[in-house]
Image (tube, rainbow, N blue to C red):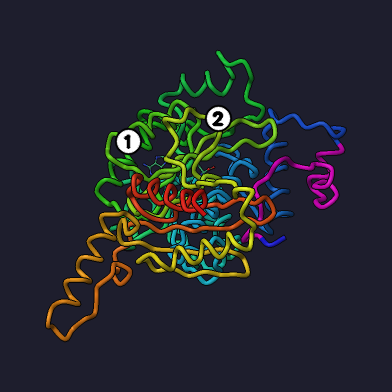
Amino acid sequence: MDLATRPPYGFVDFRALAQQDEAFNTVWQAHQYKLDFQEPYITKAVTKALLKVDFGLHLEVPDDRLCPPIPNRWNYVSWIHALLDSTNPDYSIRYDPERQVVGLDIGTGASAIYTMLCLKSRPNWTMCATDVDKKSFESAARNLTINNLITRAKLLQTIDSQPLIPLQYLGVDVLDFTICNPPFFSDETDMRQSLSGEGKSVKPNAVCTGSANEMVCRGGDLGFVTRMVEESLVLRERVTWYTSMFGKMSSAKAVVTLLKEKGITNWAVGSIDVGGGTKRWIVAWSFTDYRPPNSVARIEKIANEYLPFPTEYRFALPATIDVKAAKQTIDQQARRLHIRWTWDPQSATGVGEAAGNVWSRVYRREYERRKRELAASETEDTEMHDRSKETKVALAFRITMVASNREVVIDWLRGNDQVLWESFCGMVHRSFKKS
Ligand SMILES: C[S@@+](CC[C@H](N)C(=O)[O-])C[C@H]1O[C@@H](n2cnc3c(N)ncnc32)[C@H](O)[C@@H]1O
């Protein structure tokens, strides 16, 4: 399977895994095909086998450090792939193997798991990785070395009083993303209670081998990510996507509330839910105006107020219009507007960039008035400036005619102006009602 586009895990087929990995097969057979994930050596055997079979990676982690569950970690990396691929400045929706991406793994841990998965799956990516814990840091370096990934990684052992995103100390100017599994708990009691399932209807299904210094920090995951938000308000576009995982939905919600308070309007909420495992949440935010699709940015089971504004608008073709005519309508109407527009008849998809609301009556009237004035004037320069020549992009969009279900789909690709986006969708929809 191509790791660059490997999908997230839905479940793990342990029988198939045992057939492909001798060491895991021994454990699988010894336990008569039933795995007790409260046993640290079982979780470690599964982690090692999955990394070896699915990613060609070898892992060594000290017994007293966190051994990462691979489906959970890969699903976060896979979500990052989707986030970056769908917000590529060239508006393509596919993985671009030529694209150079630099990420930062904050608190890489003894496994360096996110760094290893990112580097292994995307050959053109490089990663920075930090940790405050000496033992974890040394183990992370060892894992990257034995997997021949160390030359594409920049490691920094940091201290808690330093920034979480220490661009200066890493010697990098800009980053494409951060990835982070923060210490979830605010103190050891909180950690003990949560890991033993106290007060929860469902107990955690797997043991956590993490030590207190890996799992505990001031304010828990919310405190840690609040620091990231504060730093992001200074660094702004120097990092394209700031992201973090959360152990509690309440923390993810609190961070979205904080982002909104700080005036950040471009964010995404993802979730990780691998067949019966412990559910986790991911929040990403950006100071750029590239908009991820709903499939990345809006998960279903969280109240609407925590979700970003929808970036997809779809409507059914009226019964009186056939698909061929609809494709022509889309292309012709777009050509008439003062926008930059490219249309691919094969996929019936067009991408446009507008410098402002060039479909409004006000704009058209003003344009016609200036044209008349220019024609009447005696100047030799009769070139009219229309807004398609401007480099500013207030709105970028993709329109697709989906023939199979007779639907027009509009995706918001770029822009900060929600009103402009809604106005554009309304204009396209109305043009079909009229024709
Ligand atoms: C929950 S562990 C995650 C480890 C690994 N990324 C994983 O997903 O398995 C959190 C990590 O953050 C590290 N950490 C805590 N405070 C930090 C800080 N201020 N800067 C960088 N790393 C920190 C801890 O030492 C620990 O390794």
Name the residue at the front extreme: 376
Q: Could you tell me how far apart the alpha carbons at marks 1 and 2 are, in whole angstroms?
A: 19 Å
How many C-alpha atoms fall within 10 Å of the one at disc 1: few (<14), some, or many (≥20)? some
Question: Which residue type carries mark 2?
Answer: Lys
Q: Which residues are magenta?
A: 3-29
Mark 1 sits on what residue?
260
User: Residue 214 magenta-drawn?
Assistant: no
Is residue 160 or residue 277 the one in the foreground?
277
For this view, does 18 lie left or right of residue 380? right
Image coordinates of residue 303 in percent, x first then y, are 48, 27
What type is the residue that disc 1 sits on?
Answer: Lys
Assess disc 2: are there few (<14), some (14-19) or many (≥20) residues with their C-alpha within 10 Å of its C-alpha.
few
Left or right: 74, with 360 as reference point: right
The answer to whether residue 121 is above or below residue 222 is below
- The residue singled out by tag 2 in the image is 301
Instruction: Return the x and y of residue 36 as percentages of the image width and height.
Output: 75, 29
Residue 324 is left or right of residue 340, and the answer is right
Disc on the earlier residue, 1 or 2:
1
Q: Does the magenta-highlighted stretch encompass residue 27?
A: yes
Could you say whether the residue bearing mark 1 is in a helix, strand or loop? helix
Residue drawn at (21%, 81%) of the image: 382
Measuring from the top left, give residue 312's x and y in whole percent: 50, 47
In the picture provided, is 211 more to the left or to the right than 28?
A: left
Can you name the residue that lies furthest to the left here? 378
